[in-house]
Image (spheres, rainbow, N blue to C red):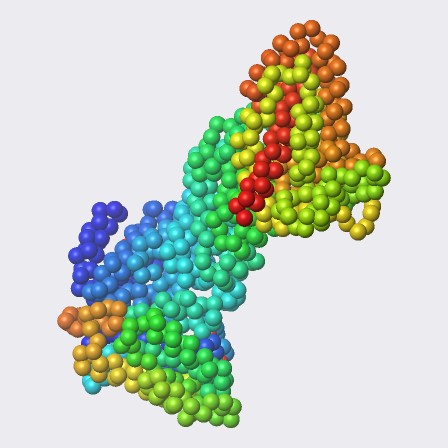
């Protein structure tokens, strides 16, 4: 439970590209075949380690639907990393990337690490966007790029962790001011590591009777 | 219980600085809360215990405190507790507990706890599914019909929520969108027990407070607070600046229909005979006058009128328009449903509403309604204007007074379409004009001829103003009052010039954008002339002046002065140019005035001392309003009053001619 840093992430992209599935695969190692529209925002967390340091990722999964765009915008601030997702089987989701990028650049802090993700790589037969196109877009806009599949979990782990590495490097380089909360990075409560008996997870129901 | 609690609270404050113990504390109290609750409701039984007798509130209070502390110290502490809450859907558990209410009072406890959280959290995670689904479930519990006793706490929760949304308008879409509605339905399906509850959106829930307050206002002192909060919530929500929310509010909520229906209910609850004296000038404000001393029904009606107008004026335009449209359908269109109902006070109230709606989109709505055909069994295909004109033939003086007063307001409002509907459509074909009078050329034809000859000289002086016979026209009007019957020996129109000039400038301001023609020209088609129902009514009432009260005469004067000041060439020449040749049987204002004055003067001459009487009548008229004149029953006084009013009318008409003529000439000089 204790960690050196906490990084806030935000996942953005058109509706149905697989944002919530990526998060679920990353935090719970499950895949959800039915599209469950995200309303507002959802959130998940997982501990990873970068160069042996425990780092907590707190990930905000946003709704891709246009109507909720204004909510999504308010979550850019205070995010250290963003996963910008498109669906390789739907060209329009790729075409909208510019708009998403503009939004992100406008509302986030300038150091935010953006990872471009072409999701659903398992659906090779239905592919509409070539891998090279994704790479080209990423190069052009200075993003990191990866193709993933939330279904087979291919590259999912890497996508989240590589983003964290990138952020960690920036911290080492001193680019991020870790004392400024708006950067989406916090120093963990490692000073009080003596307390290792913190109850966590879902064990609240087995609390002992009282009163 | 309390002392124990305090020490626990102290420990919360003590331990909050290092983050981890706070989290431990949090888990501890949450578990204690749950265990306690479960013990009181063993086997899902409904407990007879009141919540104050248990430790349940104490633990929840601490849970809430820790969350708020954590939020306030976010810089040093990570939001572990909130993270835990969201991840494990604790709020939703609270909502379920509130819905089931197996422990007496736990619902309100949860409601208050969530109210505190949403109003105190610096970083409320309202958009988070786990949070807003909970809030949504609680909204469903706050329907005022369901739980009357707890209205205060419920509306307070709704009010805090609206305030919060107002500060974070981007989140408002969560509560006003079809997408989030769908999500709620899913939620309802998942938990079968809650499916019995109404699925209410926030606004519809607030609207349920509108109707209940009518029936319980008398016996509940705290009710005013509920009313204010309810109104404030509505005002806040209708101002939200998010296209999607605005659309949702105007299309998917019951806002417009509820407000309109409530308006109609209050209207119908008014006493049939109103005491106008106090009401003539009254303008209630929904916030300040809700407890005013007028009769309750009247106060409520005028407060509500004021409230609705505020929404229309300050709310988002789209919402204003929807509200106006629903008022038209649900209120105005129903005003003339049953002819028996249309009374004096009806028209009076209509005038008050019309005034209140001034400078708002509702003004347009009413003007539109006034000239549109009704679709009911009794008044099929008639417009409200037609109906009011017909009703004005009644012998009830007050009724006539109210109708004419309303028309005066409508005319002064100068809506292009309404003016056209009432008068202009009937005269702008120039069918009143006799084209081929053998021998005599009208002043105007004369002018036209001259102009042709002089080749464009003087091109800017309107022929319609009859420049060459203006003196004759003025003299004719002044001569209508013989010298011995003048109440003022000076008999000059100069006193009126300033007022008329001001009025004319106002009128010009409003009417220049109408693109009215600048000259009266013959149309190709020749038809019989019909002055239309409104002018017919006015002419008839002028002819009837010797037999009717002088308040009507005063109102007729106001109407005539206004009409003649309009910068409309046809209306101008028809009403004012007494030298214009008219077709046979076309009524002429000048001729009607001649006859009426002749009749009046004949009557006056039968009184000895009529000169003194005239002078006294003059003093009376100068100091009275039309409402005072309405009460005068003495026949002799009325005759003299009427004579003086007509005398002033003639002079004012002259002033109008004078001002209009000089206005164009001046304008020409400036060119
Ligand atoms: N075959 C395949 N299907 C996927 C993959 N990722 C997501 N899906 C499917 O795509 C659909 C949408 O996934 P979600 O994760 O709910 O989409 P989202 O981006 O969160 O959409 P919003 O919440 O509306 O913004 C679901 O039916 C998933 O099963 C993938 O990698 N491969
Ligand atoms: Mg989603």
- The foreground one among B311 and B155 is B311
Q: Is residue B119 left or right of residue B616?
A: left
Name the residue furthest front.
B454
Residue B52 vs B632, above or below: the answer is below
For image coordinates 55% across by 44% down, the residue present is: B669
Identify the image quadrant of residue B582. Answer: top right
- The image shows residue A24 at horizontal and vertical percentages of 39, 79
- The image shows residue B529 at horizontal and vertical percentages of 80, 41
Identify the image quadrant of residue B30. Answer: bottom left
Residue A111 vs B596, above or below: the answer is below
For image coordinates 79% across by 43% down, the residue present is: B431
In this view of the protein, can residue B587 be seen by the observer?
yes
For image coordinates 49% across by 87% down, the residue present is: A89
- The image shows residue B594 at horizontal and vertical percentages of 74, 24
Name the residue furthest top.
B608
- The foreground one among B619 and A34 is B619
Q: Is residue B427 left or right of residue B238?
A: right
In this view of the protein, can residue B88 be seen by the observer?
no
């Amino acid at each position: 439970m204790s960690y050196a840093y906490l990084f806030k992430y935000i996942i953005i992209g058109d509706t149905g590209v697989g944002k919530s599935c990526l998060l679920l695969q990353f935090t719970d190692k499950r895949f959800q075949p039915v599209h469950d529209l995200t309303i507002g925002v959802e959130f998940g967390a997982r501990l990873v380690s970068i160069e042996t340091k425990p780092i907590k990722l707190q990930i905000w999964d946003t709704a891709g639907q246009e109507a909720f765009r204004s909510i999504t915008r308010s979550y850019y601030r205070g995010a250290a990393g963003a996963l910008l997702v498109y669906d390789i089987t739907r060209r329009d989701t790729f075409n909208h990337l510019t708009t998403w990028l503009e939004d992100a650049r406008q509302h986030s802090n300038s150091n935010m690490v953006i990872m471009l993700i072409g999701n659903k790589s398992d659906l090779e037969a239905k592919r509409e966007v070539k891998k090279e196109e994704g790479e080209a877009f990423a190069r052009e806009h200075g993003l990191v790029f990866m193709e993933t599949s939330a279904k087979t979990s291919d590259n999912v782990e890497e996508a989240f962790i590589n983003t964290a590495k990138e952020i960690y490097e920036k911290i080492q380089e001193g680019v991020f001011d870790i004392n400024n909360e708006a950067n989406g990075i916090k120093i963990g409560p490692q000073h009080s590591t003596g307390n290792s008996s913190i109850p966590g997870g879902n064990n609240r129901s087995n609390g002992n009777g009282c009163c | 219980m309390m002392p124990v609690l305090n020490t626990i609270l102290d420990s919360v404050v003590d331990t909050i600085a290092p983050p981890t113990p706070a989290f431990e504390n949090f888990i501890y109290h949450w578990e204690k809360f749950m265990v306690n609750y479960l013990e009181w409701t063993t086997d899902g039984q409904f407990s007879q215990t009141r919540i104050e007798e248990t430790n349940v509130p104490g633990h929840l209070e601490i849970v809430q405190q820790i969350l708020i502390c954590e939020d306030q110290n976010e810089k040093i502490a990570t939001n572990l507790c909130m993270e835990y809450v969201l991840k494990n859907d604790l709020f939703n558990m609270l909502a379920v507990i509130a819905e089931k209410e197996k422990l007496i009072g736990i619902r309100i406890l949860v409601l208050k706890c969530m109210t505190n959280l949403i109003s105190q959290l610096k970083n409320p995670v309202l958009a988070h599914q786990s949070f807003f689904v909970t809030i949504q479930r609680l909204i469903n519990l706050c329907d005022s019909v369901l739980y009357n006793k707890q209205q205060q706490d419920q509306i307070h929760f709704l009010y805090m929520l609206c305030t919060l949304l107002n500060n974070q308008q981007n989140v408002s879409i969560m509560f006003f969108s079809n997408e989030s509605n769908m999500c709620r339905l899913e939620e309802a399906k998942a938990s079968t027990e809650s499916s019995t509850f109404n699925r209410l959106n926030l606004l519809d829930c607030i609207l349920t407070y509108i109707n209940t307050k009518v029936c319980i206002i008398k016996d509940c002192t705290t009710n005013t607070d509920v009313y204010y909060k309810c109104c404030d919530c509505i005002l806040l929500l209708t101002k939200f600046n998010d296209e999607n929310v605005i659309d949702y509010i105007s299309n998917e909520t019951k806002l417009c229909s509820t407000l309109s229906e409530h308006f109609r209910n209050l209207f119908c609850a008014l006493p049939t005979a109103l005491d106008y004296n106090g009401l003539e000038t009254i303008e209630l404000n929904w916030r300040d006058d809700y407890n005013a001393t007028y009769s309750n029904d009247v106060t409520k009606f005028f407060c509500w009128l004021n409230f609705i107008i505020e929404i229309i004026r300050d709310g988002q335009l789209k919402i204003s328009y929807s509200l106006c449209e629903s008022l038209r359908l649900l209120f105005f269109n129903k005003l003339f449903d049953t002819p028996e109902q249309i009374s004096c006070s009806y028209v009076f109230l209509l005038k008050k509403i019309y005034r209140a709606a001034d400078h708002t989109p509702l003004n347009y709505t009413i003007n539109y309604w006034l000239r549109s055909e009704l679709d009911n069994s009794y008044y099929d295909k008639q417009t409200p204007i037609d109906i009011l004109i017909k009703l004005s033939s009644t012998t009830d003086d007050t009724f006539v007074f109210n109708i004419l007063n309303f028309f005066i307001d409508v005319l002064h409002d100068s809506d292009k379409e309404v003016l056209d509907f009432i008068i202009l459509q009937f005269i702008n074909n120039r069918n009143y004009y006799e084209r081929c009078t053998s021998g005599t050329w009208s002043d105007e034809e004369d002018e036209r001829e001259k102009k042709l000859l002089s080749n464009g000289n003087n091109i800017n002086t309107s022929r319609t103003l009859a420049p060459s016979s203006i003196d004759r026209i003025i003299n004719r009007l002044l001569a209508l009052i013989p010298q011995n019957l003048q109440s003022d020996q000076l008999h000059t129109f100069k006193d009126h010039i300033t007022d008329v000039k001001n009025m004319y400038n106002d009128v010009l301001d409003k009417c220049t954008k109408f693109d009215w023609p600048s000259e009266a020209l013959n149309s190709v088609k020749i038809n019989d002339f019909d002055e239309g129902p409104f002018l017919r009514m006015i002419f008839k009432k002028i002819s009837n002046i010797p037999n009717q009260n002088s308040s009507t005469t005063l109102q007729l004067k106001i109407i005539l002065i206004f009409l003649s000041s309009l910068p409309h060439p046809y209306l101008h020449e028809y009403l004012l140019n007494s030298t214009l040749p008219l077709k046979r049987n076309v009524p002429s204002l000048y001729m009607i005035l001649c006859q009426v004055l002749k009749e009046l003067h004949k009557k006056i001459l039968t009184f000895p001392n009529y000169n003194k009487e005239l002078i006294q009548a003059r003093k009376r008229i100068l100091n009275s309003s039309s409402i005072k004149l309405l009460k005068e029953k003495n026949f002799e006084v009325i005759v003299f009053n009427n004579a003086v009013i007509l005398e002033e009318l003639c002079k004012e008409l002259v002033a109008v001619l004078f001002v209009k003529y000089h206005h164009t000439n001046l304008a020409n000089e400036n060119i």
